[in-house]
């Protein structure tokens, strides 16, 4: 994709700001109509979207439908239904010292918002934040990931056809073009990406004191207690790890367990993986591919340099962007697999002898986006939750908390800041403005004489 010149970005941002200042996006009816238009766009072009996802990541139709399109449609349904409710002012209780006065909190849009999407779920992670910004009354510029070029180009083609082209725009840009885009004055920036990307976005935002939400990632740990149901635990951990071939920000990055738990887990894992994928995983059309050669090479290098023992998988093919779902045991803390977020289908298992050892291990590392704990003994789950910090927690499963209606999704520390999903998306893109309306009455003045 070719970059657009910096002055063109400036002109584009100015035109979008002019549209915002006109008040066009303020009425609830306008916002709801735009969300309905987006829903129509998804439904009418689902085959084209699935085709683009297949070209970018070789995503199977079922996986792309469930993990991108259905999540988008469900989110839209909730925002359309609740937009008016979300936007209503919060009225404060009567203050006895100011009984004739009123106070409330207005939910106002920030203004012109920039949404930076990610390549691993390229449609979902561009549109899901954008729809929250639209619901809150903002104008939005979407910059999809250049690494998923087919999905990016399709969104750039479709969005102007369905949404108001003055208020909502899509920019196609490479890395240098994105840097130029970030030099403009934004009222809010929402970014999904890696920790290094988050740092760069935050630095760019600082020059204009622009608030940000950063949805990043990190090494999300998964503790498996000896009391776990290993049949279910193996299925749920492996699903979370190998969905989208491991290219998910909240995939379990590594497992912490005792040797006894490891043995029980591996026994079930062998059964589950054979049942899911058969004997020849590479020819299985239900498995996507790594996004590009650079990431494939990085993952292959991790497998070649690990000092752990590969007990399942390990096959690679750079030409086919193939990294086989792989399990590695006897992994030490300083192993190459433990130095950065894996973001691929490699599951290291690290030996700990108790939940306290697991807690100590987790707390020595940057705060993760997700934390997983598998135990029938609820005291073990509670102990892990109470003594660690993470963006979110899911007990006895992986990733489901991300899709659970009513729960905010976001990181902490190195894994991000701010959260979204549902009402939390509306709140993320809204300025909560305090308003106090005082009475001119003499009684009100008398009550306030204490000042």
Image (cartoon, grey):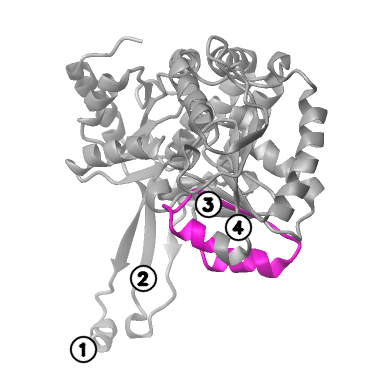
**Residue 352: which numbered mark, if any?**
4
User: Front-most of 234 and 305?
Assistant: 305
Between discs 1 and 4, the one toward the N terminus: 4
Within 10 Å of disc 1 (Cα), the crowding (few <14, some 14-19, many 20+) is: few
The local secondary structure at tag 4 comes to: loop
Within 10 Å of disc 2 (Cα), the crowding (few <14, some 14-19, many 20+) is: some
Tell me if 441 is positioned left or right of 398 in this view.
left
The answer to if 370 sits in the magenta stretch is yes
User: From the viewer's perspective, is residue 55 above or below residue 247?
Assistant: above
Please state which of the two labelled residues, at mark 4 or mark 2, is closer to the viewer. Answer: 4
Tell me if 265 is positioned left or right of 297 in this view.
right
Quarter of the rendering occupied by the N terminus = top left
Q: Which segment is the magenta one? A: 359-388
Please state which of the two labelled residues, at mark 3 or mark 1, is closer to the viewer. Answer: 3
The local secondary structure at tag 3 comes to: loop
Quarter of the rendering occupied by the C terminus = bottom left
- Occupied quadrant, residue 344: top right
User: Front-most of 221 and 308?
Assistant: 308
Cα–Cα gap, marks 4 and 2: 58 Å
Between discs 1 and 2, the one toward the N terminus: 2
Cα–Cα gap, marks 1 and 4: 65 Å
The local secondary structure at tag 2 comes to: strand
Q: Which residue is mark 1?
A: 449
Q: Which residue is mark 3?
A: 408
Visible residue check, residue 396: no
Between discs 4 and 2, the one toward the N terminus: 2
Residue 393 on image: x %, y %: 58, 55
Residue 392 on image: x %, y %: 54, 53
- Give the residue drawn at x 65%, y 39%: 240
- Give the residue drawn at x 74%, y 42%: 266
**Residue 102: which numbered mark, if any?**
2
Between discs 3 and 1, the one toward the N terminus: 3
């Amino acid at each position: 994709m070719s970059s657009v010149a910096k002055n063109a970005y400036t002109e584009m941002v100015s035109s979008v700001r002019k549209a915002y200042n006109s008040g066009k996006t303020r009425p609830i009816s306008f916002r709801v109509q735009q969300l309905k238009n987006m829903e129509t766009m998804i439904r009418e072009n689902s085959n084209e979207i699935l085709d683009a996802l297949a070209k970018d990541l070789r995503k199977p139709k079922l996986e792309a439908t469930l993990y991108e399109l259905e999540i988008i449609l469900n989110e839209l349904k909730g925002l359309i239904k609740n937009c008016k409710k979300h936007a209503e002012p919060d009225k404060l209780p009567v203050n006895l010292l100011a009984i004739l006065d009123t106070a409330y909190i207005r939910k106002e849009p920030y203004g012109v918002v920039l949404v930076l999407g990610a390549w691993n779920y390229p449609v979902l992670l561009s549109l899901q934040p954008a729809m929250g910004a639209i619901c809150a009354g903002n104008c939005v510029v979407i910059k999809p990931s250049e690494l998923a070029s087919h999905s990016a180009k399709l969104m750039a083609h479709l969005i102007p056809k369905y949404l108001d082209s003055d208020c909502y725009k899509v920019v196609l840009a490479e890395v240098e073009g994105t840097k130029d885009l970030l030099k403009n004055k934004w009222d809010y920036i929402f970014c999904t990406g890696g920790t290094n990307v988050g740092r760069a976005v935050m630095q760019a935002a600082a020059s204009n004191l622009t608030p940000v939400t950063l949805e990043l990632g990190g090494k999300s740990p998964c503790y498996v207690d000896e009391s776990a149901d290993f049949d279910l635990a193996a299925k749920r951990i492996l699903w979370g790890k190998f969905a989208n071939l491991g290219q998910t920000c909240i995939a379990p990055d590594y497992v912490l367990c005792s040797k006894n738990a490891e043995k029980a887990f591996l026994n079930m894992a062998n059964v589950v993986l054979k049942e899911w994928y058969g004997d020849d995983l590479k020819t299985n059309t239900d498995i996507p591919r790594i996004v590009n050669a650079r990431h494939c090479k990085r993952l292959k290098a991790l497998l070649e340099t690990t000092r752990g023992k590969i007990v399942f998988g390990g096959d690679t093919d750079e030409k086919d962007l193939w990294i086989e779902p792989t399990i590695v045991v006897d992994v030490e803390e300083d192993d190459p697999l433990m130095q950065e977020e894996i973001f691929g289908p490699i599951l290291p298992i690290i030996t700990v002898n108790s939940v306290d050892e697991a807690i100590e291990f987790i707390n020595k590392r940057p705060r993760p986006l997700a934390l997983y704990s598998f135990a029938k003994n609820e005291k073990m789950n509670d102990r892990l939750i109470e003594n660690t910090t993470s963006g979110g927690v899911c007990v006895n499963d992986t990733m489901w908390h991300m899709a659970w209606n009513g729960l905010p999704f976001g990181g902490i520390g190195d894994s991000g800041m701010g959260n979204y999903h549902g009402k939390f998306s509306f709140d993320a893109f809204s300025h909560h403005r305090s308003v106090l309306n005082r009475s001119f009455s003499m009684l009100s003045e008398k009550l306030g004489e204490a000042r």
